[in-house]
Every structure is written in C-alpha cells, then in structure tokens.
Image: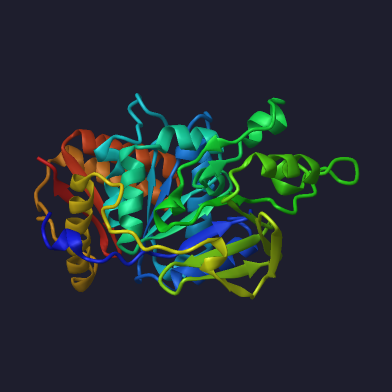
Amino acid sequence: MDDKSQLPPTPGLIALFGSGETSPTGHKIFDYILQKIPPSPRIVLLETPAGFEVNSAQVIRRVADFIHQHLANYNPIIDIIPARARGTPFSPDDPEILEPLWQADLIFLGPGSPTYAVRQLRDSLAWQMILARHRLGATLALASAATIAISSYALPVYEIYKVGEDLHWKPGLNLFGSFGLPLVLIPHWNNHDGGAELDTSRCFMGQVRFTHLMEMLPVDQIVVGMDEKTGLIIDQNGVTCHIIGQGGVSVLRTGYEHRYHTGQSFPLSEGGPYIKPAGDDGLPLAVWQQAIAMASNKSLVQKNNNISPSTAILSPPSEILELVKQRQVARANKDWTTADIIRAQILTLGWKVEDTNEGPILLDRG
C-alpha cells in the first residue's frame, strides 16, 4: 500500500431526510449542505433504490428537476446513474455507468424499496465507490428507502405493511458500522396518514408493532427516528448531529429515549463510541487507490476552473458532434431522459461527455 493510501480520511457530511426531499424543508436541507461543499458541485443521483420500478428514471428525475429549479444558484452539475439491477445493462457493478461517482461532491439516494436497495448494493462496486468517496469528503444525502437501507438492520416496510409478512428485520448496508455506530434509522417517525383509525407512525408500523420490532433487535442497537419534513445532518468531523426542518429526532436504546427538536444539536456519541476507520477499511484496495487518484485529479480540476485534466479532443467525428448537439437540445428542454439516453449512446461509440459550466467537453475513451 503506498503512502497516499495511508492518508487519514476526512469523511463528508451525511444528510438524512425523514421525508420531503423535494419539499420546502428539503430545500433547506440541500441548501445547508451545498453551502459546505465546493462551488459548482458535481451531484450524482442513483436510481438504485427504485430500480425495480418501471418508472425509476422518472422517480429520480423529480429530484434532479428539484435541484435544477430550486438550487440553480449553486451552479450544480448533475449526473444520474441508472444503476438499477445486477445482471442487467444497468448494473451497480458496471464501472462505466458508475464513473461519475469518482468526481462526486454530493451523492444522493432516495425513494424505492429498502430491501431492494440492500440486495442491489451490498458488496457492489457502486457501494464501494460511495464509501470511498464519502471517506474522502463527499457528502451523502439519503432519503426514504435509502435512509433505511444504510442501517445495521433494515426495516422491510413494504413486506410488513403492504404484504402482511410477520414482523422481522433484514441485515442492512450498515454504513455506520465502520465508525462503531450500530444505528437503525427510521424515517417517517411521526407519520399520521392513517388518521385516527390506524397508527402509521414509526414508518407505518405503528407504536405497538414497533415496540415488538425493537424487542427483536440486538441489545446494542440504537434506533434513530426522524420526523417527516425533518433532516438530520451528521458531521463526523465535528462529531455532532444537527436537526433541520419542522419536527424532531428520537434516539432510542435499551432503557432510555431522548427527544431532540429542530435547531438543536447533539453529540454523535448518542449513537455509541465513535471510531474513525482507516480509509480503506472494508474496501478493496484497488477501489480505495482509484478513489485516492481520482480525488487528486479532482483537486487539479478545481484549480483549473473545473475543466477536466484529461485531454480534450478538438476534432471528434461529425456523428458524435451531432449527438452532442441533440443532447444539448434535450437538456435545454429539460428532457433529461432523452439526454441520458444520448449520453449512453455517445459512450458506446467510444466518447465521453463532461458537462462543465463552460459547456460540454468531449473526451476520447479509446
């Protein structure tokens, strides 16, 4: 392992949404984290949690449109990664599809199925890249299904609430395990869609069922419940948690429950003894070394007005130039689906489009 791979990691923020990632509260949460990352950030949105749905592209596109419309003042460059299902052309193990992750300042995963997200991401290249980028400073923004999926134990919401399976937990992606924090994350903590007739709090489980679910967890687990339209910002460098939004956050473990409200902060030690892992802890060495190399390139890019350090080719074939023009038209019309299809087509022809504030750059991948 070379000296660079031994550099101490500086993890980025983690923003957890109790719900409402495209609501006014979501705007406040995104605004908070975008102020703390580099200007003109590269934002990568993954389809994975909703990859089983036929409209997964539209599901994640709503988030992209929200950022375009409400956070344009940050001049974000947005990539959507259609990493929908293993064993398909849109796999979370496909390095070409995942390439934008290497340069991400902010990575977002959101709606869908928690258990599906776990199945598709566990031990995948996508998840390894996400972990590596986060340990090197990228911010993670996780909402809905993704918030549950990164827990040490994931709540199978659909299976219990919709299908009627017996109460149980599934092993989660355990994002915080490397930091010594055995966290179970529950969004929609104060949901009341069921009205007076049905208790749908605790992410649609209701208090009675959730009490039984708590009893099924190992005794060392800490449950963090986030109200709807509420965000929890975890700063692992300052070792604090900060609450933004309309509600509060409940921290439960055997013997006690602490309740915190919007505007308040509390120490990360509420979740257990915090440990900062080595950068490559639990990661393939090749992924970590690639992440280090790309992070170095990213620093060079930022020093040169966000222009890619790769060699730009000035005379690509006319058919490629025409595809780039068509993609620009689609982007101008906010037809993001068509733009993504054209981008993939350009990739298959041996070229890559890099979007910059000055316009698209074509790079020869041959």
Seen at 90% across and 41% down, the residue is 197
Pick out the residue farthest to the right.
196
Say left or right for 151 vs 347: right
Name above or below for residue 203 compared with residue 299. Answer: above
Does residue 104 appear in this view?
Answer: no
Q: Nearer the viewer, residue 310 or 210?
A: 210
> Residue 17 location, x and y as percent?
58, 56
Name above or below for residue 273 compared with residue 200. Answer: below
Say left or right for 322 vs 274: left
Say left or right for 191 vs 198: left
Q: Nearer the viewer, residue 141 or 355?
A: 141
Seen at 48% across and 63% down, the residue is 273
Seen at 45% across and 43% down, the residue is 173
- Disc count in the image? 0
> Residue 277 location, x and y as percent?
33, 59
Q: Nearer the viewer, residue 221 or 98?
A: 221
Q: Where does the C terminus fall, quadrant-wise?
A: top left
Q: Where does the N terminus fall, quadrant-wise?
A: bottom left
> Residue 351 location, x and y as percent?
17, 42
